[in-house]
Structure formats: C-alpha cells, structure tokens
Amino acid sequence: VSATGRAVADVLVDGERIVAVLAPGSELLGTNLATSVDTVVDAGGKYVIPGGIDAHTHMQLPFGGTSASDTFETGTRAAAWGGTTTIVDFAVQTYGTKVPDGLAAWHELAAGNCAIDYGFHQIVGGIDDDSLAYLPKLVDEGITSYKLFMAYPGVFYSDDAQILKAMQVAADTGLLTMMHAENGPVIDVLAQQLVDAGKTSPYFHGKARVWQAEEEATHRAIMLSNITGAPLYVVHVSAKQAVEQLAAARDNGFNVFGETCPQYLYLSLEEQLGASSEQWGEFEGAKWVCSTPLRSRAEGHQDHMWQALRTNDLQMVSTDHCPFCMKDQKTLGLGDFRKIPNGIGSVEHRMDLMYQGVVTGQITLERWVELTSTTPARMFGMYGKKGVIQPGADADIVVYDPNGHTSIGLNKTHHMNMDHSAWEGFEIDGHVDTVISKGKVIVDNGQYLGRKGDGSFVKRGLSQYLV
Ligand code: URP
Ligand code: ZN
Ligand code: ZN
C-alpha cells in the first residue's frame, strides 16, 4: 500500500535498501525470487507499507523541572514496536543557551542509542542575534526545520518581532518554520486567574488554554509567514478554528501546513474532566495535560480534525510524544495545574490509532500511509530514502495485519517508559506484525530483535512539499 494506491507485489531487499518491487512470482535475472533469497517474510493477506515516520517527538525533553521519561533508547524501541521506523525529534535551545550547544547535547543523547533512524528539528527558545546567525548553518547540518513558540513566556517564547526576523532568515535559506501557535501571554493570565480562584485541578489547564488563543496565534503566524515569504508548518493543531485559519490561508495560496495528533482526534476535554481514579482522584486528568490542550467534543473539534485530514486542510499526523510519569512528574502539579509537565506519550500507538481511522471509515488506507509516512518524508526532506517502497529507498517496511488485533494498555502492549498509558483500553482492529528497519527485521510477531544503535542520524534535505 502506498500513498497513491495498492497492488499485490513482492518487495526485494538487498542489504539496507529496497532493490525491486515486482509482480508476484516474478523472476529476476532468470531466478525465481521466492527460492533464491536468504529470507522470505510472508505477508500474504496483509498490508506492506513504508515504515511510519513520526515527525514530532520529545525524547528526554526538559520541561517544568523534569525531563520527558523516554530516553532515545526506550522511546525509539517503543516506536519500532508500533511500526514507526523514523522519528524526527526536537533538539532544544532555551533562553540563555546557545543553539549549537543545545544541538550538540541532543546528538550526544541520541547517538548510539536509537533503535530506528532519527532526525532533528531545532527548537529555538527566544530568538536573539546569536540564534539568528546560526539558523542558516542548521541547513548544512541536515536540520532543515526549526520550531518557535508563541506560548510559554520565559521559557521558549518568541514575540512577533523575533518571529518575523527568524522567518526572514528562513525565507532566505529554505528552512521550514514550525510554530507552536498559542497566545502564551493571554493563556498565562487566564491560568493565573483560575488558580487565584482556587481552580487548580488538571481540567483547568484546558480551560485556560482557550481555542481563541490558538486561533489567534495561528492567524498571526500565517500573516508573519506571508509578510516574510517563509513557509509555515503549525504543529499540534487541535482547535477547529485554527484549522479554518489554515484552510482559508491555503485557499488564498499561502504556503502553510498543519499537523494534528491522535489525542486531538480521539480524546476530549469532557473526558478529561470526567476522569477520576482511586489512586489519583480528579488528578487522574493530569495524564492528558498537553499543549495545545484536549478540546471539547461538544464543540466538534475532534470530528473537524478528521475531516481536515480528509480534505488536506491538515497534511500529517505526528504524536508530539512527550511522556511523563504520574509519580514524581505529573504530580509536580498537584494543587496547581500550571506545574503539570505538558505532554502525552503516544509514539508506540500512532500507526495503530490511525489505522483504526481506516477501519471506522474516517480515512482511506492510502491516506493512512500518506498521513503517517509519505507526507512526513516529503515535508521534512527525506522522501525517496524514506516514506515510500521503491527501488533505492531504505528498506523500512512494516507488515500490518488487518485481521490481527491490538489491545492498548499498560499491562498489554506497552513499551514506553511511563507508569500509565494515556490510551488505556483502546482496541485496534489491526496489528503490527513485522517491522523492518534498513533491511533488518527488528520486530517480528511479538519479538523484539533489534538493538540500540541500529538507528542512525538522518541528514535531511530541504522540504520536498514546497514548490
Ligand atoms: O504538551 C506538549 N505538547 N508538550 C511538548 C512540548 C510542545 O509544545 O510540543
Ligand atoms: Zn508545542
Ligand atoms: Zn511538541
């Protein structure tokens, strides 16, 4: 199955690469393939797809006095279990530090530890003269996209003037600007007022992060992009009004794109409000504290995200994998939702959760491949090597069984380094059977056969999604 169609075929792999895609029973150089190769993976009755590409993960992200609980080792192994063969993680530079130092630290964390191939985007926290001067160098290092924040004043935040200057450099260099589009200063005031009124539980995280703050920031980012001519990629879109901003801009010929995440398709603010457990009481809701926040189902955001994936108003699905345990991490925010580390762990489940959208008729099989692999490869300059099954591409291949079943939960299928699952109880009418990364079978019918260091750094080219 590819982004554009499906066919019955054999895929021939030699070393790390795909060398041929052939009609079943084909002979190559006079020999019958099925009898002349070393290894045959029988995918009869199953889907063979290019390995998943999760273009938004945060292994070990420092946040709110702690760090995301998956290391590159545990996080990429969990990704592999779930049929993802490439991640693009965010190297981090915060206020007062230098971009090359942050980047070097990220290489250090990842090198030799990954189960699958990985690339980096660069988070730039608070654009200044140094970071502006460094942006063009990122392209030479194969880091062709960077992320700015309109949220989190004092940590990652850039104001409009800073964003404008960065986008001017991006327009000159071909860098893709990724934007966390929420009006942080407004949200911080609303959050303070809620806390002052004694409204401190996890649910109020979502009440403070109003959709208007997402719509407004999305619009502003689009306009700054248009002023500068820099293409824009809005991350973790969750509000239907933000999608409408992107759709209107695209209808006007603007080069703007958006991603959403499984949590904004499946989970809601109402469910977060209703969450309670014996162990955590109403603090249970902290498991789903992320930014942008879960949105109201009554307001129709989730349905609108699925629709936008069908109409290409949104182009991709990434996880924004940013796992924190309840114990000692999420609980930092007991009594003040602002101190709950933001993020949900999903890197293991994206392919399954999106496949369930095929089962339920939300998207086609081809669109599933496009949203989870082919477009991420094109958007972030890896297409041809990744995101497609064709001669010359890396042999990153997943065999997916539409007759299999996956029960998601902590004591079922769970390989992320977390003490809970944000997806407990989700049932998937499909199963990742075999995962091949650069020609090596790393997951096979419930067995992990890879090891850390199998994955290497992918130097990315400029986006191939833009004219
Ligand atoms: O809640 C989230 N999304 N945590 C990760 C950081 C970010 O803004 O993507
Ligand atoms: Zn963000
Ligand atoms: Zn993120």
Image: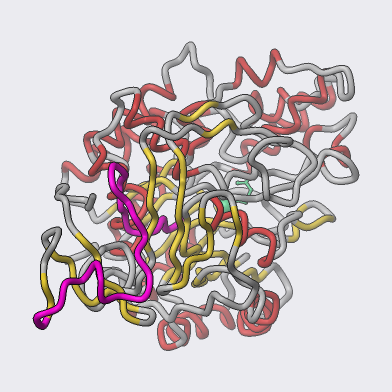
Q: Is residue 97 above or below residue 288?
A: below
- In the rendered structure, the answer to whether residue 36 lies left or right of residue 101 reads left
Where 30 falls versus 82 (above or below)?
A: below
| Above or below: residue 138 compared with residue 393 | below
Find the magenta span and give its range.
29-54
Please indicate whether residue 292 sits to the left or right of residue 434 in the image.
Answer: right
Is residue 399 shown above or below 215? below
Magenta stretch: includes residue 322: no
Residue 453 seen: yes
Work out whether residue 216 can be spotted: no
- Residue under the image location 49 percent in, 16 percent down: 297
User: Where's residue 449, x and y in %?
Assistant: 59, 65
Q: Quadrant of residue 376?
A: bottom left
Nearest the viewer among 38 and 296 is: 38
* Colour theme: secondary structure
Q: How many marks?
A: 0
Give the farthest residue toward the front. 35
37 magenta-colored = yes
Q: Residue at x 61, y 59 (%)?
A: 448
Q: Residue at x 70, y 75 (%)?
A: 109
Rendering coords of residue 110 (x, y %): 64, 75
Residue 22 x, y percent position in the rendering: 14, 65
* Residue 461 horizontal side relative to residue 255, left or right: right
Residue 344 lies in quadrant:
top right
- Who is closer to the viewer here, 338 or 115? 115
Q: Quadrant of the C terminus?
A: bottom left
Q: Position of residue 39 (x, y in %)?
A: 38, 70
Tell me the residue at 22%/64% (across/down): 466
Q: Nearer the viewer, residue 326 or 297?
A: 326
